[in-house]
Image (cartoon, rainbow, N blue to C red):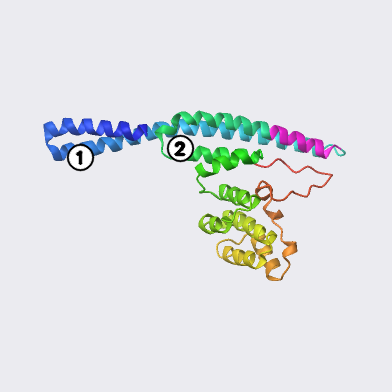
Amino acid sequence: MFTILIAVAAGCGIALVTSRDLGPVWGAVCGIGAVLVVQLLIGLVVRRKVNRINSSMQQVMLETQNKLNRRVQMFQQRPGGNVKAMQQLLEKEQFAAIRKALEISCEADRYALWSPLLKKQFSTVRMMLHFQLKEFDRVDALMPRCMFLDARSVAVKLARMYMKKDPKLDDFYRKKGAKFKGEDLALVASAYAWMLVHQERSDEALKVLVNAKKNTDHPVVLKNWELLANGKSRNYSNAGLGDAWYALYLEAPKVRQERVRQGRPF
């Protein structure tokens, strides 16, 4: 890493100079201090550059989301429109924005050698964007280089493992998914329990929700726990999670003909 190399080089230089004038003890102290200061300064510069890239990506997403919302509102004010055509238009514009965000993310590659975790961070961002585009081959290629620290990325990983019938699905949930709380846990636990139900493992799904109830009081978790506890696994539903659930592409939303569901948040 360039940052470490430059910091160590600067520290060694300072240590040699100060050792000659102030003695070896002060030389070592000043050298270590120089390493830390140089690392801090370079880190601040790189972080500022990366934040600008993130801001540009978020701006593209926000502008597109606002545009999609306006289109939906206009469509809803004109009854009798073609719902399917409108959905296709929304998806086309959404996908175009995601591809633009992917292009912007490539600007971060130049800083990858300056920050140890930056490459993993942007690999995770790109993996999530490719998932939204349903480009699952690229998603799978990026997965080994990703960091699964937030609920959405963990949920996407679980979804891909379920789609591919990965035998390590249960281990991954226990390692990454069960640690969340609140709404994050509601999404991950509800998605995982849904997978277990569809694998005809309702008893295990019930245990997952029983444990989840200790750290979240989300109504979807409570409702599905009640259904499973009463042997009504066929009625299990994550529809209450909204777009956060449907964005995993495990289940298609039920869309009424008289309205169009607003575009999924990025």
**Magenta span of residues:** 81-94
- Residue 26 falls in image quadrant: top left
Residue reaching furthest right?
A: 80
Quadrant in the picture for the C terminus: top right
x then y, percent, for residue 217: 60, 62
- Real-space CA distance between mark 1 and mark 2, rounded to the nearest whole angstrom: 29 Å
Question: Which of the 4 image quadrants contains residue 224?
Answer: bottom right
Give left or right: position of 168 versus 76.
Answer: left
Work out whether residue 106 or residue 23 is closer to the camera in this orientation and state it.
106
Residue at left 56%, top 37%? 126
Tell me where residue 157 appears, x and y as whole percent.
Answer: 58, 49
For label 1, the residue is 29
Mark 1 neighbour class, 10 Å CA radius: few under 14, some 14 to 19, many 20 or more = some
**SS for callout 2:** helix
Q: Give percent across and percent down for residue 133.
A: 66, 38
**Secondary structure under the numbered disc 1 in the rendered image:** helix
Residue 236 percent coordinates (x, y): 71, 61
* Residue linked to disc 2: 118
Q: Label 1 sits on what residue type?
A: Val
* Frontmost residue, 22 versus 167: 167
Magenta span dominant secondary structure: helix
Residue 174: numbered disc: none
Residue found 59% across the figure and 56% down from its top: 167
Magenta highlight on residue 83: yes
Q: Which badge, 1 or 2, comes first in the chain's sequence?
A: 1
Q: Nearer the viewer, mark 1 or mark 2?
A: 2
Q: Residue at x 60, y 67 (%)?
A: 207
Mark 2 is on which residue type?
A: Leu
Residue 64 visible within the image = yes
Establish if 41 lies above or below 247.
above
Q: Residues within 10 Å of mark 2 (few under 14, many from 20)?
A: some
